[in-house]
Amino acid sequence: MTDESLIREVDEEVRRDEYKKLWDRFGNLFTVFAVLVVAAVAAFKGWQYYQQTQAEAAVLVYSEAVKKAGEGKFEDALSALKAVNHQGYGQLARLQEASVLAEKGDAEKAVAAYDAIAADPAIDPLLADVARIRAGYLLVDTAKPDELLGRLGKFDKDSEVWRNQAREIFGLAAYRTGDFVMADRYMNAIFADPETPPAMRQRAQVMVQLIAPNLPKT
């Protein structure tokens, strides 16, 4: 045996002794740690599977409810929507529930449902804004412009995503109540906005033409 091989063998023996001492001292801790890691991974995978199955079940129930609403089976649709048990789809189900109430002609309950969604701090802010706008459209034929401004006034800014929807609501309510100057201002703002969807711009143009004969003569 050469000096080099002897040194290597002694070195390996020393390392084995050190490893054994470490294992004798901390082996149980290493085992417990390994078991905990495996258990944590298994629990995470189980949670992911549970979330996936819950989401898939919610999609099926939600889709079936939307289908029933499309067929005019409003009560069945409402019952199905209440059964959606999922955080994300549950919020969509609440919006759809309010929409179904509106479709079946129960505007008062629909507005109350939209208002409840908008006031719920657990609701996604984007969905809360959708609820506010939808409630506003339902109130166009009954609410005064001032009431609608109180509800949706925060959207009447050029930086707001829902500005044109809110302005259409204000303009229609103003036209209904005979405030043609206000109606003209909002409809022209919609028409002039380059980001206004084509269909809405066309509606605004029609409204501007209807309002024009009623404006004060200058």
Image: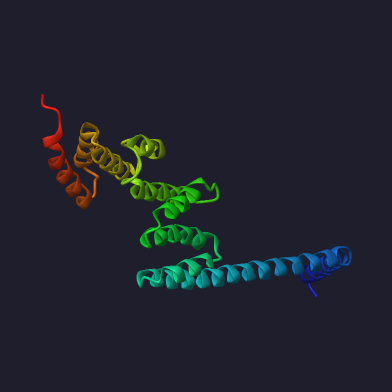
Residue 20 horizontal side relative to residue 114, left or right:
right
Residue 123 horizontal side relative to residue 161, left or right:
right
Identity of the residue drawn at 23% across and 50% down? 197
Q: Quadrant of residue 15?
A: bottom right
Placement of the C terminus among the 4 image quadrants: top left
Placement of the N terminus among the 4 image quadrants: bottom right
Q: Nearer the viewer, residue 33 or 104?
A: 104
Q: Residue most toward the bottom?
A: 1
Q: Nearer the viewer, residue 118 or 33?
A: 118
Q: Is residue 20 above or below residue 108?
A: below
Residue 177 at x, y percent in the picture: 26, 38
Number of numbered discs on residues = 0
Q: Quadrant of residue 33?
A: bottom right
Residue 44 at x, y percent in the picture: 64, 66
Q: Nearer the viewer, residue 60 or 96?
A: 96
Residue 54 horizontal side relative to residue 62, left or right:
right
Residue 155 at x, y percent in the picture: 36, 39
Residue 205 at x, y percent in the picture: 15, 44
Q: Nearer the viewer, residue 182 or 108?
A: 108
Q: Is residue 28 above or below residue 180?
A: below
Residue 194 horizontal side relative to residue 26, left or right:
left
